[in-house]
Image (cartoon, helix red, strand yellow):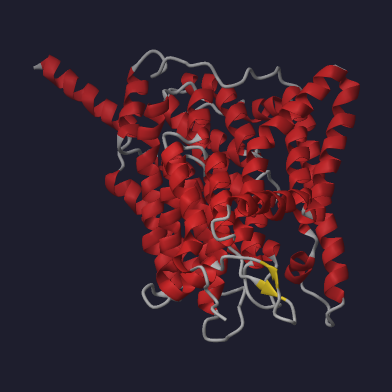
Amino acid sequence: MDPHPFGWLSLVPPLVAIFLAILTRRTLLSLLVGIVVGALILHHGNPIAGLQSAWVDYLWAKLIDEDKRQVYTFTLLTGGMIGVISASGGMRGLVNLIVRFADTRLKGQLTGWLMGLAIFFDDYANMLLLGGTLKEVTDRLKISREKLAYIVDSTAAPVAGLALISTWVATEISFIDEGIKLIDGDAKPDAFLLFVQSIPYRFYTWWALLLVPLIAITRRDFGPMLKAEIDMLSSQKPSNEEVASAEQLPESSSWLNAVIPVMTMLVVVVGVLYQTGYAAAMGEGEPPSLLEIIGNGNSYKALVYGSAASLVVALLLIAPQRLLSASQFVTAILKGFYAMMPALLILWFAAALAAQTERPKFDKDMQMTQNGLNTAGYLEQVLEPSLPIEMLPTTIFLLAAAVAFSTGTSWGTMGILVPLSVSLTAAMLTAGGQALDIADPILLSVVGSVLAGAIFGDHCSPISDTTILSSQSCGCHHMAHVRTQMPYALLGAGLSVVVGTVPVAFGVPVWLCHVLGVAALIGTLFLIGKVPEQILQEADALRANETAE
């Protein structure tokens, strides 16, 4: 039986989704069209059977899927918790607690970075809260609005993407799980464990986060950002006319109103992971390691319990303080739910599209029980002779960056590319009949590359929602933010390839790649970066000498 009955047509649905997203910049519509096209191909062009299958076999099936329902629930509950603590002023109180220590340009930049790390659970909340709160501080310290927007934007998505507790984690794990389902055989890796082990291999994400404090500590800038900083230092007012932030921020309340619900989520998630993982791992013989316990834990159950507990704690903590009325509580929760809807729809549609690309399944009588395009199998057949597997992480990183840049969405990019990337890599690694090793650096690097590449492309894209939101919340002109941030993003991405994805695929230890990458970041800053204060001092000295003469 032909293992690839659809041939090149198996590539059409994801390619249609990618190209339509690039052309229309509407990820949801593009994913939906890709699903319909895939169903039509699977039913040999029959429009009635194809449309019925698109809804019944894929969209409806993924809407009621138990794992997916837990992901949807976690995302909504987390959004509700964020809505409550934001509306009550708890997050503003946490920000205000820390910004009082910012009394120099160095401390101001580091404060913004540290606050970005602290608000790790959601990139939107991060940008809105930090941008709206820190503008007054950075204006007073003569830090340009472009620099503030860069600090906020380059911290928000990377920290949310890396954090084990965030509005991103369930979605990232779900996309990885969709790819794992496409892998042949019964011995498949755990999605949560693969997610965790890939964290060190997300070179761009780590180095984008690290570059922010390095620039602050070395006091060096380059490119358009250097000019923006010089203009701000030499002016008597902000370098940009302040634009209205995307949301009017509430008055601040106690920072504990933000910290306690978030810590509750963290404790409950870790506790449930440990409890469920220990029970599962103990059945395998020897006492399990911590990594085995976490890997065997029910991550979806842990996330749902954690998000539910955090929302309940937020309500019980804030209600007695009479900061919000009953109707305001309801409004805050509904706003939090609404803010998560685009992510939920992308997750739903991407899961349906990924399901179409699976390998067909047959029962013992060789009757087909599930139709599928076997896209990963066809890609493996085509790419294996022409693309060295060592170049796969770099290729995936660049592809994810291009799609995210063109579409303006890291979530949509991950939804389209993560399942295919995981299944393709597994197919190429096991092509010789060997078992799949979850700790294989190429597999981990591919997972890290597609997640990091999506964030890189999003950072550079002028149509990205995070780019727009960070510039608006910081009172920075949108395109000024794009121009000043892009050289820093390109530096991190270039080094991610040269001393990251390429060497690690050829056997260089991941820790050594990070050492080389950090050294290269610092060296580049000293090689091409300049201190804006020093440039102004030299210019003033030159003018003074000319006047004296």
Q: In this view, does 128 lie above or below 215?
A: above
Q: Which residue is drawn at 54% across and 50% down?
A: 34
Q: Residue at x 28, y 49 (%)?
A: 527
On screen, residue 340 versus residue 34, left or right, reads right
Q: Quadrant of residue 319?
A: top right
Question: Which x, y percent locates residue 170?
Answer: 70, 51
Q: Quadrant of residue 218?
A: top left
| Quadrant where the image shows the C terminus | top left
> Outermost residue, left direction?
549
Q: Which residue is drawn at 74% across and 23% down?
A: 87
On screen, residue 368 versus residue 131, left or right, reads right
Q: Nearer the viewer, residue 487 or 532?
A: 487
Instruction: Look at the image and tell me whether residue 211 can be seen.
Output: no
Question: Which x, y percent locates residue 349?
Answer: 63, 47
Instruction: Look at the image and tell me whether residue 371 can be seen.
Output: yes
Question: Which x, y percent locates residue 123?
Answer: 60, 38
Q: In this view, does 507 lie above or below 156?
A: below
Question: Which x, y percent locates residue 213?
Answer: 48, 43
Q: In which quarter of the image is residue 439?
A: bottom right
Q: Nearer the viewer, residue 390 or 492?
A: 390
